[in-house]
Image: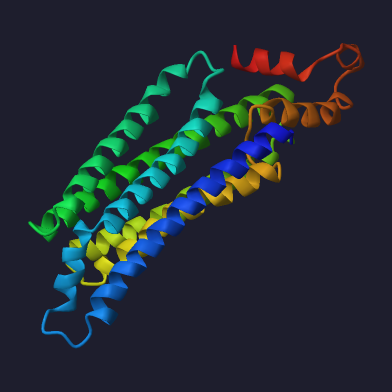
């Protein structure tokens, strides 16, 4: 991989790591004050913790979480746009994940506003977080489904064009794509179940669920740097790797013709 993408992903992961570190540090500070410093007082530690949500550190922590979430979702959106931008017939699908991304931004802003007013109603903050999780989960599922469908369409077209023995490389790419989504989806579904059953575990699990959102882009960046994820060059690279092996099996009058991978891709998706 070239130096520029490596620097970009280094900066990207560093920013998310710093934001999440600040988020965890602020949450730890709030718990420390409520349950350790306030130990032995007549005030309920839970009420003390709720009152600390107005503290500058707690507000900054929620802002760090929301920004890191935006960065993680932007990476998913970029992957989807990268796959669909060169396809004329299905380019109209690009606005769908874009609209979902704007919905994620709107619900996250609503969550931030309700968090700063948590002393007025904790139920409103919990409800706002639940709505945010549902919209965010929907964005991940829809985006991942579009990415998987795009890869499967290209695999099917490639197998029809040059033979059914090719295109196995796409299976691993699809597996990695669903892997990134499942990391966050499982934790989100568990939280929604806890919220629906009004289980008290939902409150500490909120912190765990927040961390799951950030692990997924770290795994994706690792796959990209290892050259195992879909990039702008993947389509041409896989086609060029599969084509020479099949050319030997073609009739002589066809195999002597010079065929480039870019021409095959153009013919497949014209």
Residue farthest to the left? 120
Q: Decide which of 137, 45 is in the foreground and name it.
A: 45
| Residue 84 appears left or right of 124 | right
On screen, residue 155 above or below 211:
above
On screen, residue 141 above or below 191:
above
| Residue 28 appears left or right of 53 | right
On screen, residue 182 above or below 104:
below
Q: Decide which of 197, 220 is in the foreground and name it.
A: 220
Quadrant location of the N terminus in the rendered image = top right
Q: How is the image coloured?
A: rainbow
| Residue 178 appears left or right of 46 | right
Image quadrant in which you'd find residue 37: bottom left
Q: For the point 38% across and 57% down, which residue is it?
A: 23
Q: Looking at the picture, how far across and down is residue 267, in whole percent?
A: 66, 13
Quadrant location of the C terminus in the rendered image = top right
Whether residue 221 appears in this view of the structure is: yes
How many circles with numbers are drawn on the protein? Answer: 0
Q: Looking at the picture, how far across and down is residue 120, in whole percent?
A: 7, 56
Whether residue 178 appears in this view of the structure is: no
Q: Looking at the picture, how far across and down is residue 44, in whole percent?
A: 13, 79
| Residue 146 appears left or right of 164 | left
Image quadrant in which you'd find residue 262: top right
Q: For the point 85% across and 22% down, which residue is it?
A: 250
Q: For the point 17% across and 54% down, which residue is it?
A: 125
Q: For the point 26% across and 71% down, which residue is it?
A: 201
Q: Decide which of 13, 101 is in the foreground and name it.
A: 13
Q: Looking at the picture, how far across and down is residue 176, in whole percent?
A: 58, 47
């Amino acid at each position: 991989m070239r130096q520029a993408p490596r620097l970009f992903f280094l900066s990207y992961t560093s920013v998310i790591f710093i934001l999440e570190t600040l988020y965890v540090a602020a949450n730890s500070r709030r718990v420390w004050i409520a349950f350790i410093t306030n130990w032995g007082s007549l005030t309920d530690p839970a009420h003390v913790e709720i009152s600390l949500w107005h503290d500058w550190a707690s507000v900054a922590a929620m802002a760090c979480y929301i920004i890191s979430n935006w960065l993680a979702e932007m990476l998913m959106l970029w992957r989807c746009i990268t796959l669909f931008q060169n396809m004329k017939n299905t380019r109209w699908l690009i606005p769908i994940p874009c609209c979902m991304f704007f919905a994620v931004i709107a619900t996250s802003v609503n969550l931030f506003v309700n968090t700063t007013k948590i002393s007025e109603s904790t139920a409103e903050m919990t409800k706002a977080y639940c709505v945010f999780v549902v919209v965010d989960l929907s964005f991940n599922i829809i985006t991942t489904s579009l990415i998987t469908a795009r890869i499967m369409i290209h695999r099917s077209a490639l197998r029809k064009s040059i033979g059914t023995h090719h295109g196995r490389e796409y299976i691993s790419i699809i597996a990695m794509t669903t892997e990134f989504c499942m990391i966050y989806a499982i934790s989100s579904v568990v939280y929604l179940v806890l919220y629906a059953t009004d289980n008290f575990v939902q409150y500490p699990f909120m912190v765990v669920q927040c961390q799951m959102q950030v692990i997924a882009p770290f795994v994706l960046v690792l796959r990209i740097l290892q050259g195992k994820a879909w990039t702008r060059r993947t389509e041409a690279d896989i086609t060029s790797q599969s084509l020479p092996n099949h050319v030997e099996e073609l009739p002589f009058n066809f195999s002597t013709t010079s065929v480039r991978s870019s021409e095959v891709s153009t013919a497949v998706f014209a």
